[in-house]
Amino acid sequence: MHIGILTLTFSLPGCGSLKEKRQRMGGMHERFGRNPAVAVCESAERDRLDTSEWSFVVVAISLRQVESLCSEIEDKVQRTVDGRVSKATRELL
């Protein structure tokens, strides 16, 4: 079994309130948490308006599957989140 941790830091220019931040980042749990191989949480920057950090823990039988799921998550986030990914890190365990 292989485990990967994908951490994405988002820049949210022009975000004026925590409510707006939640709307712009909303649905992360619903979009990615449905997959039983993925756990997702807001891992840092909860109180900052212009930044958000989310971590995804991916578990799979092979390292290739973990890397594939991480890539799918990154691609989908780029298309669906109203913000810019300013940093992406992957850690394989």
Image (cartoon, rainbow, N blue to C red):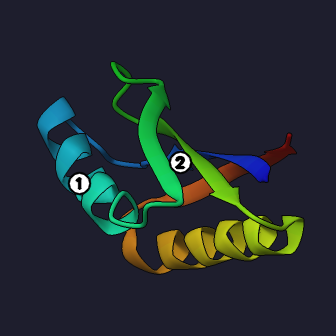
Which quarter of the figure has residue 58?
bottom right
Name which residue lies at 76% across and 65% down: 61
Name which residue lies at 75% across and 49% down: 4
Q: Is residue 65 above or below residue 2?
A: below
Which quarter of the figure has residue 50?
top left
Q: Is residue 7 left or right of residue 24?
A: right
Of badges 2 and 1, nearer the viewer stands: 1
- Amino acid, disc 2: Phe
Which residue occupies the extreme left position in the image?
Answer: 19
Mark 1 neighbour density, 10 Å: few (under 14) some (14–19) many (20 or more): some
According to the picture, the residue beneath numbered tag 1 turns out to be: 26
According to the picture, the residue beneath numbered tag 2 turns out to be: 10
Mark 2 neighbour density, 10 Å: few (under 14) some (14–19) many (20 or more): many
Closest to the observer: 14 or 58?
58
Q: Do the residues under discs 2 and 1 have CB atoms within 8 angstroms?
A: no
Residue 5 appears at what percent x and percent y? 70, 44
